[in-house]
Amino acid sequence: MNLYWNAPTREDDVAGQIDLLEKVVSRGYAGIIITPDETLPLRSPIRRIVSRGLPIVVVGTNLGIAPTAKLAYVLNDDVAGGQMAARRLGKILHGQGAIAILGINPQLTGITARERSFESTLEREYPEIRVVVRRLGYYSVAQEQQVAEDILNRGQAVDAIVALSHSSTTGAFYALVEFDKTRTIKLVGFDQDLMPPIRTGAIDSVVMQCTYDMGRTAMEIMDGQVHGRAVPGISVLPPILMTGENIDSPEIRRQLLANWWATQ
């Protein structure tokens, strides 16, 4: 199967991603698996490609386009991820404290779902944990680090930081290292892959997507689309909370594999 897998080198290169999509149709590929950089800009190009009969599996973000025989979604359960992060925070803060939320991104439906689920769970289950800082996210780790450093520079009293994306988690970690706050301010993140800080406790925990399972599921759906089989329009997979205690477990190790496209 001649498959085009789209994976831009920069997370903010929306124009480049759209350009690649436009070129694919004329090159004879059997289908596309794509992780959108943003929601709104990708809707029209993907609608055009699907209307031409080329199968697409969208991973990680619901574009707001209804699934069809040629368009399917493989999504992370971001509502469950928000709940997981809130409950972890409630545990490590013993149900009280002040926190900052970084990485809020209205352009990505998954991030928005995480943030809403996280805050609603906190309000319902841990009313004595207060959100005192909220910051919009960036795709650049350096920018996210600057945002976190600005919070620390201002002397904002926070007991923990919740970072909703890979870049905000990494940026917040670097800022805490710079200010020597890794032991006094807890960091609960999403999606990042810096393993040593999790082992040492400098990052308390990370809500990680089951990327291996999501990739395998996307490939299976694409194979079904190409061969005319009925496939689910939306597949939702639960995330995992990675901590220093379970980082070497088989469940975590499986998700860190990068060969989900290989046959078994």
Image (cartoon, grey):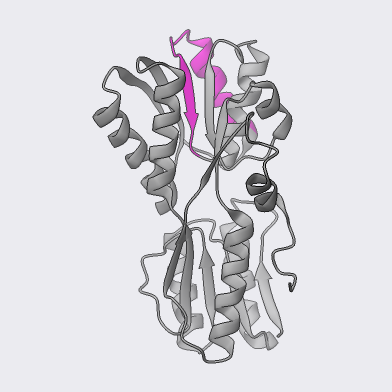
Q: Is residue 100 visible?
A: no
Q: Is residue 206 above or below residue 12?
A: above
Task: Count how many numbered circles sit on residues in the image.
Answer: 0
Left or right of 23 on screen, residue 135? left
Image quarter of the N terminus: bottom right
Identify which residue is drawn at 54% across, 85% down: 225
Give the residues in magenta. Answer: 142-164
Query: In the image, 73: left or right of 211?
Result: left
Residue shown at 45% from the left, 29% from the top: 88
- On the picture, is 119 further left or further right than 227? left
Q: Which one is nearer the viewer's eye here, 160 or 22? A: 160
Q: Position of residue 70 (x, y in %)?
A: 48, 83
Q: Is residue 90 magenta?
A: no
Q: Quadrant of residue 259?
A: bottom right
Please, which residue is most extreme toward the bottom here? 228
Camera sees residue 117: yes
Please give the name of the residue rendered at 56% of the width and 30% of the height, measured from the top-left corner. Answer: 205
The C terminus: image quadrant = bottom right
Q: Is residue 11 left or right of residue 264?
A: left
Residue at figure coordinates x 61%, y 30% from the top left:
171
For residue 99, above or below residue 217: above
Where is residue 241 drawn, in percent x and y? Answer: 53, 39
Q: Image quadrant of residue 215?
A: bottom right
The answer to whether residue 242 is above or below residue 34 is: above
In this rendering, the answer to whether 263 lies above or below 185 is: below
Q: Position of residue 178 (x, y in %)?
A: 67, 15
